[in-house]
Amino acid sequence: MRIEKLTKRFGANVAVDTADFHIGKPAMVGIIGASGAGKSTLLRMINRLTESSEGAIRFNDRDVTHLTGRAKREWQSQCAMIFQQFNLVPRLDVVSNVLHGTLNKRSTMATLFNLYPTEDIHKAIEILDRLGIAEHAPKRAEALSGGQQQRVAIARALMQDPQIILADEPIASLDPMNAQIVMDALRRIHEEDGRMVIANLHTLDTARNYCDRVIGMRNGKIVFDGRPDQLTTGAARDIYGAGADFSEGATSTDINALETPQQARIRDAEALV
Ligand SMILES: Nc1ncnc2c1ncn2[C@@H]1O[C@H](COP(=O)(O)OP(=O)(O)OP(=O)(O)O)[C@@H](O)[C@H]1O
Ligand SMILES: [Mg+2]
């Protein structure tokens, strides 16, 4: 995937500013940055949920930036999105939610009458089984825990057999245990199926633990792009901005370990005496 000078303006506000990067092989990439840095806008542009203002998105040497109609829908099913709030149909059973992942490929009539081919139903159950939630297949989505619902959303994405999975804060609404289960599932899908995963992540340590590569954004610009081991405390401070007040809910142990500017001033002052 090649992202070339990709830019999104909302009026005078530049949400993503000439983003440029290349993902050569199906890696697992984490995007981090403070709130408002442009992470969601970047993912949404890649999926074409949001139109870019300038620049290009290329995949396998094909320019997908301006596809329309059927070609655009095909691209969108090649790069499935997963959202923080799962975006399931709460009152619908789990299997039907997963089968929604095939909507792009089905006729309006079949959709209207909720007719799914048997092989699709088997495939849906298989995917649910792989994610460890097949037993919940007949339940309403709303009856499941957050972690289970996010796995249903992943199953729905897998139903499209996408080459790329774009996950926008997939674990931001989950407790630590469910967060781990969901990140493990994404990592496994990446490793076993060779799918590219690009995930916006709230916490540094999640990005460090699960990703091959981390992209850091600040004020719409990419300010870091490297391996997790290159993501030093200094680099992290650059990404989040000196003086950024991290909310407790969003902080990882690593961020907690970062010095605040105030602490740095105290340290410097102490060094002087
Ligand atoms: N639909 C929109 N209309 C106007 N401005 C928008 C819109 N979507 C995003 N923005 C602005 O673009 C900037 C980037 O927003 P974005 O949602 O991409 O950030 P983010 O990094 O995903 O933040 P968060 O961590 O809070 O999800 C922000 O200044 C935001 O207010
Ligand atoms: Mg966001």
Image: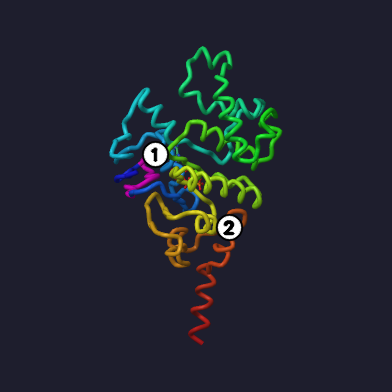
Q: Is residue 51 above or below residue 172?
A: above
* Left or right of 80, for residue 127: right
Q: Give whichever of 101, 49 is nearer the camera.
A: 101
Across and down, in percent, residue 211 comes to 48, 54
Q: Secondary structure at mark 2?
A: loop
Q: Is residue 16 magenta?
A: yes
Instruction: Characterize the magenta stretch by its predominant secondary structure.
Output: strand
* Left or right of 196, for residue 96: right
Query: From the Cβ of disc 1, is ligand 1 less than 8 Å away?
Result: no
- Residue at image position (33%, 43%) is 6
According to the picture, the residue beneath numbered tag 2 turns out to be 251
- Residue at image position (41%, 52%) is 219
Question: What amino acid is labelled 2 in the image?
Answer: Thr
Across and down, in percent, residue 177 comes to 66, 51
Across and down, in percent, residue 111 comes to 53, 17
Q: Give whichever of 3, 136 is nearer the camera.
A: 136
Magenta span covers which residues? 8-21
User: Mark on residue 46?
Assistant: 1
Disc 1 packing (10 Å; few <14; some 14–19; many ≥20): many
* Alpha carbon distance from label 2 to label 1: 27 Å
Of tags 2 and 1, the one toward the viewer is 1
Question: What amino acid is labelled 1 in the image?
Answer: Ile
- Residue at image position (46%, 62%) is 236
Q: Give whichever of 166, 38 is nearer the camera.
A: 166
Q: Give whichever of 192, 93 is nearer the camera.
A: 192
